Image: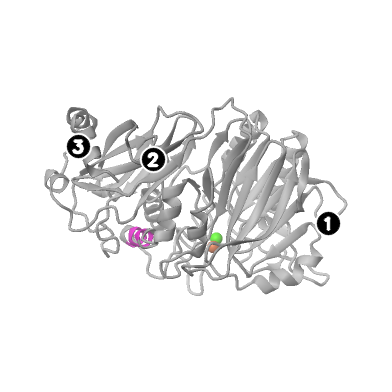
Amino acid sequence: MNRRNFLSLSGAGAAAFALAVNGYTENRAWASTAFPSYPFALGVASGEPAPDGVVLWTRLAPEPLDPEGRGGMPSGNVRVEWEVAEDESFTRVVRRGSEVTLSELGHSVHAEVTGLSPAREYFYRFRAGSEISPVGRTKTAPARTASPQSLSFALASCQAWVGGRYAAYRNLAAEDLDLVVHVGDYIYEERNTEKLADFRRLHSEYKTSPDLQAAHAAFPFVVTFDDHEIENNWADKISQPDGEASNSPERFVELRAAAFQAYWENMPLRRDARPEGPDMRLYRRLQFGRLAQFDVLDTRQYRDDQLQEGFPSAPLDPRAVDSSRTLTGDNQERWLFNGLEKSTARWNILAQQTIMTQFDYDTGPGVAVNHDQWDGYAASRARYLDFVSRNDVSNPVVLSGDWHSAWVNDLKSDFGDAASKTLATEFVSTSISSGCGWAGAVAAAVSHNPHVKFADGSKRGYTRCTVTPETWRSDFRIVTSAADTADPATTQNSWVVRNGRPGAQQV
Ligand code: FE
Ligand code: CA
């Protein structure tokens, strides 16, 4: 990186920066003197790719593991400048600006850059005082009316802390991708994760991973949370009992507010995703020309409580099929269906958390399901599948995580009848690092669920998806050990969906 260049380019902008700070008092001492150590220790990220811009993220944290959760920063506001260039050496800077970071927002930056060209690679970096961040690479989405010939992305989820290295992310960072879609369990809460400071410190710890940083620096991320960003299997404002007593609703709302705040501070999300207390609007839509539409769901915040906690399954609760039950909440469901109805995309993708397919774990005459997944909310699933079928939604593809195992599923009009119509295709990505203690239970029941074409909980990795107007291809990329620093990823197997023909075929 070229420090001198950054300084000379930004020198003329002092007056403009003063206008941009909007009445905030900058902490001049911190902005003009050295930080106790490098303030960009958490790396950089970009997200929410649009045709004309992206969100640029960083967080000042010279001491990431500071137990106070302040990242080693004082209270007070510190200005951070950013610039975006067409080239990695920043000789062609096209946009530049500054943000005032606030201690109450964890000194995080969420710069919404606009005025960029569609479907184009850019490089970005930040400056605070005399310190310059690592360089990130990002890419804008194609123009709304464009018909891209290809889109390439990785699906990731479930990255339990395994000591700092992630073989999956190290390999993912070396792929050639347009974006990364992360469907949750970005962190795993710990027994003592109770306050905002605890959630901040935990996010900081994860972000110290050089492999996770490399992935963020290489591609824009589109993220949504699942349960462990707060607490195992939470549902709306209801805490799940975990051995002892569950949190009271009052206490859980406080916990949720703290967890959401830390999540937003640490993700390349837009400013309008910033939580208000325990509420956060996370579901949203991203478009990649006429090729693909991503509907990114939040299936935790508005769901009904789970009917059964049995793990990995429990005998099917007859109430699971009640038409009043919801996994998405009514507003989100209406928003989803409206967007699907108006979609002009060739591939209509749900990026969401838990497995959608029906899956019976009972290999005998009974039926046992996991009630945390769509099986516990069968009416929600039926409404979605019925909607895409009745409205001829073009190529519905469901992307899932949560279950630390890779799956390929035909989503059927009648899961009890293997000959019934396949309405949509589901790919479930295995975990980046989290273990799958229930892999045996899955393997034992797969042959009793003929609409499940593949399921394997024994491997860690991510899913690489390459989408063209005629074909969707998913490659299950796996590593042999979650934290190995030399392990090359290999392709376990590959699956193809043809335009107009739901259901994947193995390559
Ligand atoms: Fe997980
Ligand atoms: Ca989960």
Quadrant into which the C terminus falls: bottom right
The CA distance from mark 2 to mark 3 is 28 Å
Q: Amino acid at mark 2?
A: Phe
Q: Of marks 2 and 3, which one's residue comes earlier in the chain? A: 3
* Residue at the (22%, 34%) spot, across then down: 10
Q: Amino acid at mark 1?
A: Gly
Marks 3 and 2: in contact by CB < 8 Å? no
Instruction: Tell me which secondary structure the magenta stretch mostly adopts.
Output: helix
The CA distance from mark 1 to mark 3 is 61 Å
57 or 264: which is nearer to us? 57
* 2 or 3: mark nearer the eye: 2
Tell me if residue 326 can be seen: no
The CA distance from mark 1 to mark 2 is 51 Å
Q: Badge 2 is on which residue?
A: 123
Q: Badge 3 is on which residue?
A: 24
* Residue at the (38%, 47%) spot, across then down: 277
Please indicate whether residue 81 sits to the left or right of residue 468 in the image: left
